[in-house]
Image (cartoon, helix red, strand yellow):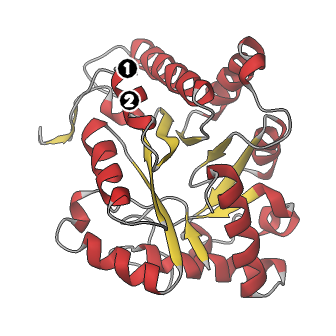
Amino acid sequence: MLIDTHTHINFKEFRNDGDQIIRNCLNKKIWMVIPGSDYKSSRMALEYANKYEKGVYAAVGLHPIHLYELKNEKGVILSRDEEFNYDIYEKLAKFEKAVAIGEIGLDYYHLPKDVDTTTAKNKQKDVLWQQLLLARRLDLPAIIHCRQAHDDMIELIKEFKKKYRNLMPISKPWAVMHCFSGTESLAWQYFELGLIVSFTGLITFSQQWDELIRKLPYDKFMIETDSPYMTPEPHRGERNVPEFVGLVANRIAEIKKLSFERIAEITTDNAKKLFKIS
């Protein structure tokens, strides 16, 4: 059994065959968590999860790139803006199949060109803070995205934990750094803050994280596809699908010199514990 802890079946790339892909995965004992990136995709993630008795779960959240309207050089809209509404996301998060708040975080790679940089970053921090608070009040884990913002992320999490120490779990992890691509030192900083990390197909075509993976404690990592993105070898250039999560597990098994079955067992157990699913 495998669990793809981050797949965007709710995105337009799967508009025509999302359910078929899900059924194929369930038949192969591959479960999945579908995160939202805004209200519409969060609601769609829940709609997918509610169709299936077991094995398909949703996360709801507002991704930082949706806090402003972003356009490319030609003026084409890449993402539309949404104002975060705590009450609306709280209602979504209270559905039974909602197992996390996410995908939330900081993204300094995608910043609006028509807004002051400091203002844009502060808005991202404020919305992340609110969503972390929502997660802790509902005792749900957070799925966190971070791109070119790790220093601010570390500082914010430290401040959040200090202010809301009464809401923090004593020993269990309470969040995951999704699609982790940072350094070994950075990973251990997140571990010390009570987070774990998740790996995508990136590790199948880059050896950058091999040493970190070799040293990783068994209880500190999960696997994901981030489909339709981050397609692993040997399928680069194709649309990524949840079924490819096995290629990520296989690469970790090679690096850690363990069996595929052992990595499947470890990562499935970690996912079940974090998301409280069985």
In the rendering, at what x and y percent does residue 249 appear? Answer: 65, 77
In the rendering, at what x and y percent does residue 69 appear? Answer: 22, 29
Q: Residue at x 64, y 51 (%)?
A: 276
Q: Residue at x 32, y 26 (%)?
A: 67
Left or right: residue 227 versus residue 217 is: left
Q: Is residue 35 above or below residue 40?
A: below
Q: Is residue 199 above or below residue 195?
A: below
Left or right: residue 173 versus residue 117 is: right
The circle drawn on residue 231 is none
Q: Nearer the viewer, residue 123 or 135?
A: 135
SS label for mark 2: helix
SS label for mark 1: helix
Q: Residue at x 29, y 53 (%)?
A: 47
Label 1 belongs to which residue? 87
Q: Quadrant of residue 15?
A: bottom left
Q: Quadrant of residue 258?
A: bottom right
Can I make out residue 190 in this image? yes
Looking at the image, do the residues carrying marks 1 and 2 touch, with CB atoms under 8 Å apart? Answer: yes
Q: Nearer the viewer, residue 178 or 88?
A: 88
* Badge 1 amino acid: Asp
The circle drawn on residue 91 is 2
